[in-house]
Image: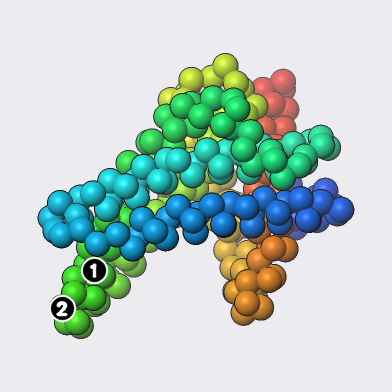
Amino acid sequence: MNHYASSASLKARARQSLLGHYLTFSGAFITLGILQYVIVVPANLMQLSPPFGMVFYYAGTFCLELFFAIFQAGLAFMFLSNACGQHVSSGSLFSSFWGNPARVIKIQLVPSLLLLLPHVLPSILLNQFFRTAKREWLLYFLVLTLLFLPVRVYIRILYSQVFYIMLDFPEMEPLACLRQSRRLMQGNKLRYFYIMLSFLPLSLLGVCSCGIGLFYVYPYREQTYANFYLDLVAVRQSGDRH
């Protein structure tokens, strides 16, 4: 029988391993936030006439998502290293650029494609509301967003382990990393979903503190996710031995 660590235990480990390292991880999140602001905001301000402008905008958004996945892989490296007691620095955020960024993009391509429609359709409806100021477009946007929300959460959970797997098994092909994530999450999706929900109150408090509290919440959450992966692997390996 598999005995996974409780969410409380995973969080306790996260708090312990983050002691003395909050500045390092907060610095990485600040750096990533600045990069996203510098790159994404000017792109969103570009005014292009439809329909070409709309196609160009969503294509650009999709490419930026793939690009920033390289930083997400860098964050995964930082938190996985810290969970294993290894030295980390804010510069590790860029580690995937020195490694194999093409591999990261190939891995991210599948979940990004699966989430393309759930992202684009509500966005189009919201743009129609801003263009026409007709309330029915806002209603359509809200309804479609709620309908797609379970799909977006499910896909995120299903492929939540891909970057940890990629780092743990550098020889593994991108499609194999995706398959392995789906395999690891069999029977563990609700556990992961519960952990996601458990950080919502802290995240709301972080937002209410003008964002300052998020410098505590984000590292805490991501470190817990890294511990979740290590717990999955440890239990699966123990089961294989028996």
Residue 8 shows up from this direction: yes
Q: Looking at the rendered structure, which numbered label has been put on residue 64?
A: none
Residue shown at 39% from the left, 54% from the top: 152
**Residue lying farthest to the left in this orientation:** 51
Colour scheme of this structure image? rainbow
Question: Which residue is painted at 33% across and 63% down in the image?
Answer: 45
Quarter of the image for residue 119 reads: bottom left
Q: Secondary structure at mark 1?
A: helix
Q: Which residue is label 1 attached to?
A: 127
Who is closer to the viewer here, 46 or 3? 46
Q: Is residue 196 left or right of residue 49?
A: right
Residue 68, x across and y down, in percent: 49, 44
Amino acid type of the residue that numbered disc 2 sits on in the rendered structure: Thr
Q: Amino acid at mark 1?
A: Asn
From the viewer's perspective, is 99 left or right of 182? right
Residue at (78, 56) in percent of width and height: 23
Which residue is identified by label 2?
A: 132
User: Could you tell me residue 164's position as x and y percent?
Assistant: 61, 35
In the displayed image of the protein, which residue is found farthest to the top? 171
Q: Is residue 53 left or right of residue 237?
A: left
Q: Is residue 229 visible?
A: no
Q: Quadrant of the N terminus?
A: top right
- Where disc 2 sits, the SS reads helix
Q: Quadrant of residue 141?
A: bottom left
Name which residue lies at 23% across and 49% down.
56
Relative to 137, does residue 234 appear above or below in the rendering?
Answer: above
